[in-house]
Image (cartoon, rainbow, N blue to C red):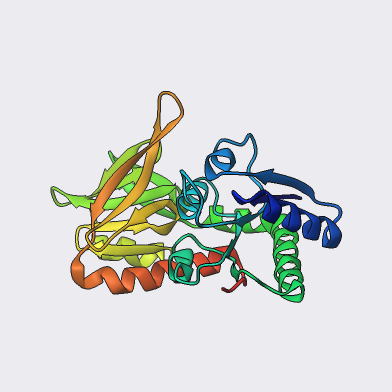
Amino acid sequence: MRIAICDDEKDIREILAEKVNKYCPEAEIFCYASGQEVLTADRMPDILFLDIQMPGVSGMETAQGLRARSKELILIFVTALEEYVFQAFDVGAFHYLVKPFEEEKFVCVLSRAVKQCREASENAGVSMAKEEDRHILILSGGSHIKIRLCDIVYAEVFNRKVVIHKMTEDMEYYGKMSDLEKLAGKDFFRPHRSYLVNFQYVVRYDAQMIELESGNVPGGTVSKVKVPLAKKNYPLFVKSYLNYNRRTEGDGNL
């Protein structure tokens, strides 16, 4: 198990590393002095204790970058600022520790995070199999094609057809977006009457648009696409997205 600590203050890094080593001696511990160091590290940690206010790349920006690459990362903010707690929900934080905190509280949060990490590792094969089993069947170009729901980035209505966008290709068929919405389930959201998005690929959003990962381009860069978000749907989108993060991150609560 890899546990990382990211804080620009050396003393804080050393204190947290000592606590982690004391209560989870089997873990590999990695310390980083900046968000940039975490983002460019060779391997993703299983659990990350992350400060928010840091020079250069902030903790929140670091969390957004890491979350775009991994939905499984257990993210624990450690900060003296309480006002970022709602933003922490947006990146699927497991917990939000406010400095100074009692050791008993730290141990409780660490124990829960380690437990979830172990359970996720044990159940990964089963969960992945179940997720991959969910699919739709479309008729496109005279052929019936099976498409896994987890591979759909988003869908849109264009020229009276439903166009399904995957990371690697696009497919279109004659059908109704409402029917696809029902089949897709609660991991998808319809932000606009012409669009359906998969929460799994959401990178960022505001009151007017949602930005999604849309594929890989030469050089290893992930391309992105923006889809409109109707003003009236914004509150429900935020609520649904937070619920999605809670489901996919397990039972950890802020």
Q: Nearer the viewer, residue 174 or 98?
A: 98
Decide which of 62, 69 is in the foreground and name it: 62
Give x and y (percent) for residue 212.
35, 49
Left or right placement of residue 127 versus residue 165 in this view: right
Q: Residue at position x 38%, y 49% from top? A: 153
Residue at the farthest top position: 218
Q: Quadrant of the C terminus?
A: bottom right
Q: Nearer the viewer, residue 79 or 199?
A: 79
Residue name at image x 58 percent, y 74 percent = 253
Instruction: Report whether 39 appears left or right of 153.
Output: right
**Residue 48 to residue 207: above or below:** above
Q: Report whether residue 132 is seen.
A: yes
Residue 152, image x, y percentages: 39, 49
Q: Position of residue 110 (x, y in %)?
A: 73, 65
Query: Residue 210's quadrant in the figure?
Result: bottom left
Identify the residue at the far left of this view. Answer: 159
Q: Is residue 125 visible?
A: no
What is the number of callouts on the image?
A: 0
Location of residue 197 by image quarter: bottom left
Query: Residue 242: percent from the left, percent from the top?
Result: 44, 69
Residue drawn at (43%, 65%) of the image: 87
